[in-house]
């Protein structure tokens, strides 16, 4: 740190003195490998070439050594051009026709190329080619992004997503294709209101930083973006000048930064195309050109990484700028003879730029590469550039380049540390790329001092779903039912261009399913604990029989034609929960995250017996549950299940009967209400039947979690007496008759015994009783 201060002080002192000689931008060297022996080389297949007169160099955002050079020759490297390379070619067996490349994109582990209006895939790890499937119309361009934060499924989905389209088509009739499989298979993409849009198609992009699909519309020299989802789909981005065919570069990191350029224009957007501005040119603190087009230069190529931008012109001018917050200016470095028709730019590291030029060999087919590395920090110390010293010594946070998940009703706390230079008062800024989805609150305070007396400033950042902050108008927030994404960035306002090594702190936040969440059914009283079932027997290929009158394999409540033998999976289900048949019951559902108990779930959920048992119902009906609309049930859900299969009822298709969103009139208030939890005290009521039930449980409340929270568990119902074989009506009739007969006899017998006949009958029974006693006494005496 002290050394940096001394160097900066020396640079400030040198501003007062003219330089004795000009400092060169870079010193060239040539990469030449594998050419010791005169081995015969051949190019297999058709040699590729780029359709434009200017060059492009596309670096893989995640695999820093993988890059593609596009020019009159095409080169693919996996070692950052540190070896001589043969021109890139495609096997003749692919039958591409004219091998002209019009667009290229790295999609995760593969390279996609548009050749002769078709998409081809090259897997550079196994050296294999494939043709994409599903595209039925000509395409010219590809667009996509790569997520390098983690291997979280949401991050992987970003890398897997690719659009293919024909640039210049009329938007209303354009054929747009989308792939979620790294380009291996495409399907037609249906954009809402596409037929109503006017103008030609300038591009289709998935802006993951805003969770929107954006279409670039070009009409009469103006261009603007339209977006796919609420709330930004109700208006267009602000129009900007579109003079010439703009090449559009999405910078890495999902921050929503776009770079638009062609030979005479350079534009930048920091918010996924909603605002597009020209890039200024500065000398010292003065703006000399409000846009690069005013400098009367011809742009040859452009390079960008997460935070930096470089431009090379045919006039041998090299411009550099940072992509920080509120920064949209370039500085021009000293001229040097660095341009050629084949030259390209690439950032090899933070503050390290390389000018790359392929060199043909008169003997070998493999090209060498001339490299001219530019140390940006060293160049910016030139006093002629009049660059201000960076006001910040340190900006750090543990969340940098990480990915986080915020599920519904969850929050995220982050911290950052800033140490300014002595006497400086920089202003830190905390921003989210998608404020419609992610809300924030930041607090800054002094947090002690460094060893050399500098003040440490601590930033505490609280993040929550914008919908739950309660501060934004509903017309501003995105739909709570749709998972979204956003980046959070901590940077310094109006940061000096000399802050090359002071990168913004960026993290990716997925407002969606937290994969560490799961639900567990509380099981304190089991059939094994009470001795009804033996856990050893349950683990020994245990099976049980469901009688044909109790289940329906089609889940329509109709009796089956034969009994069903069910094998019990103890490893999955454990010992079944014990439930008394005559007591209304509902399971206690627990939410766990990362192996820790979080809460008892009070959200709405549904149950289904997986083997089709229908010997249970519910304690509430649609009417007693106070439904204002006809509630959903398993019958209606399964009718429209389609490819979802048996367990199709989930948070995506559930509609509560207590909200205004359900328009179905309440026509049958007496049907069972099949939703448990939530605002009702609904419970399961079992029929008079003992036995095993295996339930599938699904949380259907769309506002509880973005996850599809599901589980299966078993229940053993006991205490039910066997059903009588005599019809219930006969039993009631006979019992009533017996009671009446008993009452009549109790009334009539005392009266009969007082009559003459009654006395004779009484004497008969007395004599009979006496004879029986004598007979018994004789029999005992003989023994």
Image (cartoon, helix red, strand yellow):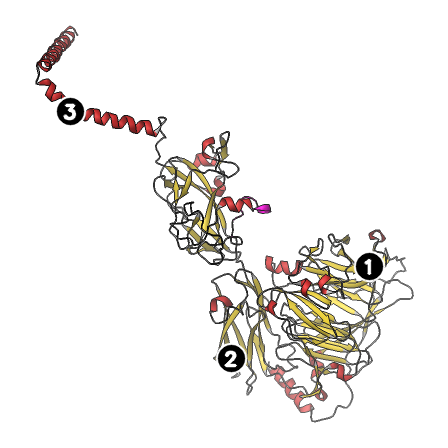
Q: Residues within 10 Å of mark 3 (few under 14, many from 20)?
A: few
Q: Is residue 414 left or right of residue 153?
A: left
Describe the element under mark 3 as helix, strand or loop: helix
Percent position (x, y) of residue 188? 69, 56
Q: Earlier in the sequence, mark 1 or mark 3?
A: 1
Q: Is residue 334 visible?
A: no
Check disc 2 and report the residue beneath it.
Answer: 456
Magenta region includes residue 558: no
Q: Is residue 506 left or right of residue 574?
A: right
Q: Residue furthest bottom?
A: 16
Q: Earlier in the sequence, mark 2 or mark 3?
A: 2
Q: Is residue 329 above or below residue 95?
A: below
Q: CA distance from mark 2 to mark 3?
A: 102 Å
Percent position (x, y) of residue 614? 45, 38
Q: Which residues are magenta?
A: 641-650
Magenta span: predominant SS is loop
In which quadrant is the C terminus drawn? top left
Q: Is residue 529 above or below residue 163?
A: above
Of the residues tagged 1 and 3, which is closer to the observer?
3
Q: Earlier in the sequence, mark 2 or mark 1?
A: 1
Check disc 1 and report the residue beneath it.
Answer: 116
Q: Is residue 618 visible?
A: yes
Describe the element under mark 1 as helix, strand or loop: loop
Of the residues tagged 2 and 1, which is closer to the observer?
1
Q: Which circle marks residue 193 in the picture?
A: none
Magenta region includes residue 643: yes
The image quadrant of residue 646 is top right
The image quadrant of residue 270 is bottom right
Residue for point 77% across, 60% down? 139
Check disc 3 and report the residue beneath it.
Answer: 746
Percent position (x, y) of residue 560? 50, 32
């Amino acid at each position: 740190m002290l050394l940096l201060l001394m160097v900066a002080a020396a640079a400030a002192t040198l501003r007062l003195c003219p330089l004795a000689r000009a400092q060169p931008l870079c010193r060239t060297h040539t990469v030449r490998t594998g050419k010791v022996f005169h081995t015969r080389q051949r190019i297999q297949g058709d040699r590729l070439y780029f359709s434009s007169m200017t060059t492009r160099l596309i670096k893989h955002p995640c695999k820093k050594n993988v890059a593609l050079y596009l020019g009159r020759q095409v080169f693919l490297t996996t070692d950052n051009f540190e070896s001589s390379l043969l021109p890139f070619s495609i096997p003749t067996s692919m039958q591409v026709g004219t091998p002209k490349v019009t667009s290229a994109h790295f999609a995760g582990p593969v390279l996609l190329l548009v050749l002769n209006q078709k998409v081809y895939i090259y897997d550079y790890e196994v050296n294999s080619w494939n043709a994409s499937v599903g595209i039925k119309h000509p395409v010219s361009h590809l667009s996509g992004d790569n997520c390098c934060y983690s291997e979280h499924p949401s991050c992987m989905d970003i890398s897997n997503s690719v659009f293919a389209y024909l640039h210049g088509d009329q938007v209303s009739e354009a054929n747009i294709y989308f792939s979620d499989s790294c380009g291996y298979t495409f399907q037609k993409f249906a954009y809402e209101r596409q037929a109503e849009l006017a103008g030609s198609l300038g591009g289709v992009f998935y802006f993951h930083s805003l969770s929107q699909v954006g279409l670039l519309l070009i009409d009469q020299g103006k261009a603007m973006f339209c977006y796919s989802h609420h709330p930004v789909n109700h208006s267009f981005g602000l129009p900007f000048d579109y003079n010439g065919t703009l090449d559009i570069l999405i910078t890495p990191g999902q921050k929503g930064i776009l770079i638009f350029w062609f030979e005479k224009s350079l534009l930048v957007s920091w918010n996924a195309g909603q605002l597009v501005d020209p890039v200024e040119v500065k000398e010292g603190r003065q703006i000399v050109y409000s846009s690069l087009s005013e400098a009367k230069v011809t742009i040859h190529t452009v390079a960008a990484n997460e935070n930096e931008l470089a431009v090379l012109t045919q006039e041998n001018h090299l411009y550099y700028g940072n992509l920080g917050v509120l920064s949209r200016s370039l500085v021009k470095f000293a001229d040097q003879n660095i341009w050629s028709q084949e030259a390209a730019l690439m950032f090899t590291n933070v503050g390290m730029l390389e000018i790359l030029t392929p060199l043909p060999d008169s003997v070998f087919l493999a090209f060498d590469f001339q490299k001219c590395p530019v140390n940006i920090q060293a160049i910016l110390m030139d006093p002629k550039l009049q660059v201000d010293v960076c006001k910040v010594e340190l900006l750090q946070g543990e969340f940098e380049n990480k990915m986080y998940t915020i599920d519904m009703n969850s929050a995220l706390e982050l911290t950052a540390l800033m140490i300014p230079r002595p006497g400086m008062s920089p202003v830190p800024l905390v921003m989210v790329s998608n404020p419609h989805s992610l809300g924030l609150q930041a607090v800054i305070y002094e947090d002690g001092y460094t060893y050399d007396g500098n003040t440490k400033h601590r930033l505490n950042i609280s993040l929550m779903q914008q919908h739950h902050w309660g501060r934004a108008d509903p017309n501003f927030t995105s739909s709570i039912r749709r998972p979204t994404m956003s980046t959070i960035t901590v940077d310094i306002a109006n940061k000096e261009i000399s802050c090359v090594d002071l990168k913004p702190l960026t993290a990716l936040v997925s407002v969606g399913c937290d994969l560490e969440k799961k639900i567990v059914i509380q099981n304190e009283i089991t059939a094994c604990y009470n001795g009804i079932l033996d856990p050893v027997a349950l683990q020994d290929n245990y099976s049980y029989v469901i009688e044909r009158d109790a289940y329906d394999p089609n889940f329509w409540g109709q009796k089956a034609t034969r009994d069903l033998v069910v094998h019990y999976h103890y490893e999955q289900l454990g010992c079944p929960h014990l439930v008394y048949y005559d007591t209304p019951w509902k399971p206690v559902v627990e939410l766990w995250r990362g192996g820790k108990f979080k809460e008892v779930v009070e959200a709405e959920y549904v149950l289904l017996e997986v083997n089709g048992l229908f010997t249970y119902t519910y304690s509430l009906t649609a009417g007693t549950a106070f439904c204002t609309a006809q509630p959903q049930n398993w019958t209606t859900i399964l009718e429209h299940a389609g490819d979802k299969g048996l367990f199709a009822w989930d948070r995506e298709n559930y509609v509560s009967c207590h909200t205004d969103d359900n328009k179905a009139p309440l026509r049958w208030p007496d049907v069972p209400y099949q939703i448990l939890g939530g605002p009702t005290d609904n419970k399961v009521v079992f029929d008079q039947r003992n036995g095993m039930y295996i339930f599938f449980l699904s949380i259907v409340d769309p506002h509880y979690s973005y996850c599809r929270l599901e589980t299966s568990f078993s229940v053993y119902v006991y205490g039910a007496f066997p059903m009588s074989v005599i019809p219930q009506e006969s039993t009631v009739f006979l019992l009533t008759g017996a009671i009446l007969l008993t009452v009549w006899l109790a009334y009539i017998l005392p009266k009969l015994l007082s009559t003459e006949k009654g006395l004779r009958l009484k004497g008969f029974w007395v004599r009979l009783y006496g004879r029986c006693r004598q007979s018994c006494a004789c029999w005992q005496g003989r023994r």
